[in-house]
Amino acid sequence: MSDKVRLVEVGPRDGLQNEPGLVPFAIKIALVERLADCGLRHIEAASFVSPKWVPQMADGHAVLTGIHRRPNVIYSALTPNLKGLEAALAAGVDQVAVFTAASESFCQHNINASIATSLARFAPLLALAKEQGIPVRGYVSTVLDCPYEGAITPEAAAQVASALYQMGCTEISLGDTLGTGTPKRVRALLSAVSQEVPLPQLAVHFHDTYGQALVNIYAALEQGIRIIDSSVAGLGGCPYAPGASGNVATEEVVYLLQGLGMLTRVNLDNLVQTGRWISQQLGRRNGSKVGLAWTK
Ligand SMILES: CC(C)(COP(=O)([O-])OP(=O)([O-])OC[C@H]1O[C@@H](n2cnc3c(N)ncnc32)[C@H](O)[C@@H]1OP(=O)([O-])[O-])[C@@H](O)C(=O)NCCC(=O)NCCSC(=O)C[C@@](C)(O)CC(=O)[O-]
């Protein structure tokens, strides 16, 4: 099994979608460019969702078309339906992500649809993406706990992950949306899901609400996971998961992985400066412990 880990930087999307105010697109573009300068090779840069639902992401076209694109970076976006994919394609996206949930109630609150309806909406999207040669990532939210239903079984999460994989998603990201998970439950989840989706196609997406994200990532690494989602400065939260804090900070994940010899090419010093810069731009406390402690 490979020792190398692939990071998916979700700060410009998952991070900024939850800011109370509208972040100017020039700042979003600068953030994406700075993250690419740090050596990050997959950046989720935008979302093509309804602006009535998430006004913070209404400028996806301006962001994606404004970036000075690097050939070795994947710029991706969230697309809940065919309309979203068409808009993302018009903006020149490299990859898209569909998103559903392991819990019916969260799915309803997040995308106004049942899990089955969400999957049905993805079918024409996946067909068009295939025709256009665009890979589609599938997110499963609330794989451990739901804010409305409580604990979710590993089997329920595995069933939704399996459906997305069978439909043609090239990679499935498992979202601990509330950040309540602990390693024992993460192991049980991954054991169940990896029976349905091959491990190299699985990513983990931890929020750090209870301070468990890094230890959960370590447990996932031990189980063979090699794709990790993270967000610079720990930006984020989810508008439909009350109380959820940001994603695990990319600085923390890079520090851990470099310590383990599993990631080399990201410049941590640049990343720390980028995390400090965006925290200052947003007028919020830096959510990265590494970002606060770094003195080099
Ligand atoms: C899915 C919908 C659109 C259904 O929303 P709906 O209201 O049921 O949709 P609709 O089809 O009835 O359309 C309503 C209006 O939205 C428009 N519309 C419809 N689709 C689009 C589109 N793609 N782009 C722009 N506009 C769109 C559509 O044209 C129409 O406009 P109107 O006629 O009223 O003027 C809505 O619920 C939505 O946009 N939800 C997005 C919620 C969201 O972005 N949540 C955060 C991302 S998920 C997340 O953060 C979790 C994750 C991935 O990080 C993992 C984890 O941590 O768990």
Image: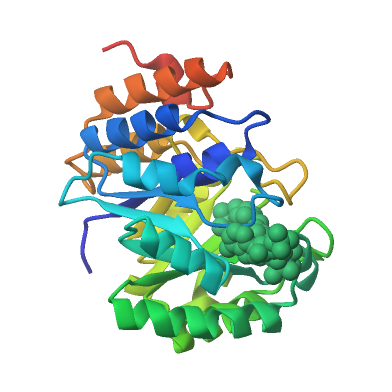
Residue 197's spot in the image, x, y percent?
A: 43, 81
Residue 129 placement: quadrant:
bottom left
The structure residue drawn at horizontal position 42% and vertical position 85%, both measured from the top left corner, is 127
Q: Position of residue 235 (x, y in %)?
A: 53, 34
Q: Name the quarter where the N terminus is drawn.
A: bottom left
Quarter in which the C terminus is drawn: top left
Q: Residue at x 64, y 56 (%)?
A: 50
User: Which of the pair 85/214 is nearer the observer?
Assistant: 85
Q: How many marks?
A: 0
The residue sitting at 42% across, 18% down in the picture is 276
Say above or below: 36 vs 226. above
Furthest residue to the right? Answer: 148
Visible in this render: residue 35? yes
Viewed as shown, does residue 208 lie left or right of 271?
A: right
Furthest-top residue in view?
Answer: 295
In the picture, measured across the screen, residue 296 lies left or right of residue 85, that is: left
Q: Is residue 116 above or below residue 256?
A: below
Colour convention:
rainbow
Above or below, 11 relative to 24: below
Q: Quadrant of residue 208?
A: top right
The percent position of residue 246, horizontal first and vertical second, equals 59, 38
Q: Nearer the viewer, residue 138 or 30?
A: 30
Q: Quadrant of ligand 1?
A: bottom right
Q: Residue at x 34, y 82 (%)?
A: 130
Quadrant in the picture for residue 91? bottom left
Residue 250: where, in percent of width, then height? Answer: 40, 38
